[in-house]
Image (spheres, rainbow, N blue to C red):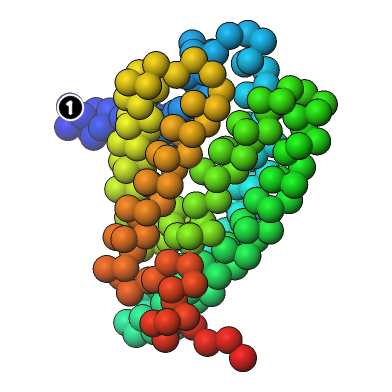
Amino acid sequence: MEEQIRLSSREVVRFRQRVLKPVFVFSTRYADVLVVPWVLKSETLYVYFIARMASLCLPMMLAVLGYKVEPVLRSLVGKPEQTSFRAAAARVNLGYLMISGAMALFLIICAPYLAKVIDPEAREILIWLVIGQSAPVLFGATGLLMKIVDRGTFYDVLGGITALMFLVGIVLLGARDGIDVAQTFAVSQLTLAAVSALLLTQCGIWPGLTALFHNQIKLY
């Protein structure tokens, strides 16, 4: 009987890790995609989806960088002396800043051309979506670093809270066009990154370029 209870509890844990957690994370990160079919008209909906797909170029580039640096950060975070980890984290933040800044600039330059091909509204929608996705420019690799310092679950909870804020904002604003949705979603993304960056300072990790002023990284 006890073995059956243990097996069932293990199955519940596995179900949470393999099914519930990915669904929850997806729902929070793409809350706007789940909401817009209920908010926007059909002729505006496809414009938003195209702009949203274009904006995903930015997090995809950062995901590649995160995949490369994560093993190095994990090897450093376990050491008793944390100076090397903090220096590496500062360099990662600087890398995120440069890559996300360059990609954001590229997408903003492309926005007018997208507006000509698709719809004039696509330009503003894409710009606001890019602003939200460009949180690493100001705050660094918050999602990656929160996971590295064993605050990944708390980061997911914060993502759920900011997604809820986004939904409340949509209701309160009575959003009926893609620009309102993109603006509200950008605010929620920036809020998540700002709160996470503030929490990471407790671990001695300073966001973005501020690491240069706290002796966490030196450029030669």
Q: Quadrant of the C terminus?
A: bottom right
Q: Please count the marks in the image.
A: 1
In the rendered view, does 102 fall on the left or right side of 149? right
- Report the front residue among 210 and 8: 210
The relative height of residue 148 versus residue 57 in the rendered view (above or below) is below
Task: Quickly name the residue at label 1.
Answer: 1
SS class, disc 1: loop
> Label 1: few (<14), some or many (≥20) within 10 Å?
few
* Residue 10 visible in rendering: no
| Residue 195: % across, % down | 32, 53
* Residue 196 visible in rendering: yes
The relative height of residue 10 versus residue 219 in the rendered view (above or below) is above
Image point 49% across, 72% down: which residue?
Answer: 209
In which image quadrant can residue 47 be found? top right
The relative height of residue 190 versus residue 97 in the rendered view (above or below) is above
| Residue 174: % across, % down | 39, 16
